[in-house]
Image (cartoon, rainbow, N blue to C red):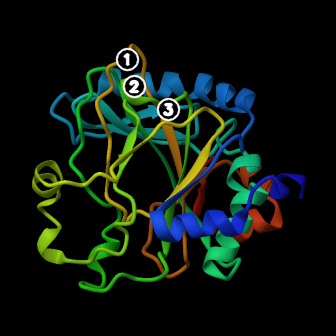
Amino acid sequence: MAALQQYDIDMKLAELRINGYAVFEDLIPVEKIDRIREAFLPYLEAVRTHSDPAGGVDLHARSDDRIVVEGRLQVVNRYTLYVPWEQPFADPEIYENPVLLEFLDRYWGTEDYRITCYHSNNPYPGSEYQRWHRDGGISKMVPHVGLEVCPHFGVKFPLVDTYEENGSFEILPSTQYLADPAMEDRYDEILESGDFPSRRRLNLKKGSLWIQDPRTLHRGTPNRADHARPELVICYSLPWYGQMPALQMTQAEYNSFSDRARQMVTNYQVVD
C-alpha cells in the first residue's frame, strides 16, 4: 500500500489516455533490474551470435534443460527475444506489482485480464531507425474509429538507463486515436516530411516501468553506444483479445503463483 501512495494513479491514467503512454519512475529496485540484466544478456548474446543475418529465422536456445528461448533478428542489429517464464525474469514484484495492477484495474474497470506474452526489444550498437509504426493491428480493427478503451498493453521496463546515444524509444504522443487507414503505410513519409514538434524521446532510467498504448505511433532509434539497450515487455490483454502462444513454465513455477497470478496466467504450458 505504501508504494501505491507514491504515485497519483488518476494522473497516470490521464497521461495514458491523453499521451498514449504513462511512466512510473523508481518502481522496480535497481538491484533487481541488475540481476535480471545479468541473467538476460547471455540469452540475448546467443540470439545475436546465431541469428541469420538476413533476419526472419528463429533461434532456439535453451535456458536450461526445460525452457526454450526463442529470438530472431528484426532489422539490422535489433533483436527480439521471447523471455522465459522463470527466475529471475518471472518476478511477481514486477508482473504483479500493486501499482501496476491498480492502474490496469482502474483503466479497464475490472480485474479480469490476462498476461499474454513476455518478450523484449534489444537494439545493439549499429542498429538503425525502425519504421514509424503501431503494434498489434488494433487500429485496423475498427477503421475510422478511435476506440476509447485499448484492449491490450505492453508494459515495459529497461534493463539499462536509456538515452539518445544508446537508442532510446521515440514516440509521437496522442496518436492512439488516429484511425485513418489511408495513412497506415505512409507514416515514415508523413512524419519525416511534415512538422510534428510533439515527437518525444523517452530517456528512462533503470527502475522505471512504462505502459504503452500500442496504437500510439512509435519507433526504435539508432544505438550509437558501446552496449546493447535491452528492454523487457510483459503484455496484458482483456480476455477476448486474440490468442498468443502459451507461456512455458515449470510446474514449480506455476505452483508458486498467487491466486491473482493464476487468474491472469491462463494460457500456459507446463514443461517437464
The residue drawn where x is 67% and y is 48% is: 250
* Residue 267 in view of the camera: no
Marks 3/1: CA–CA distance:
29 Å
Q: Amino acid at mark 2?
A: Asn
Disc 2 or disc 3, which is closer to the eye?
Answer: 2
Q: Nearer the viewer, residue 19 or 151?
A: 19
- Contact (CB < 8 A) between labels 2 and 3? no
Q: Which mark is residue 166?
A: 2
Q: Residue drawn at (71%, 65%), measured in percent from left and top?
A: 9
Q: Would residue 225 be found to the left or right of residue 258 on screen?
A: left
Q: Residue at x 81, y 67 (%)?
A: 259
Q: CA distance from mark 2 to mark 3?
A: 28 Å
Whether the residues at callouts 1 and 2 have beta carbons within 8 Å, the answer is yes
User: Mark 1 vs mark 2: which is more N-terminal?
Assistant: 2
Pinpoint residue 211: horizontal percent, then vertical percent: 54, 57
Label 1 crowding class (10 Å Cα cut-off): few <14, some 14-19, many 20+?
Answer: some
Q: Label 3, secondary structure: give it.
A: strand
| Amino acid type shown at disc 3 | Arg
Q: Which mark is residue 225?
A: 1
* Residue holding disc 3: 62
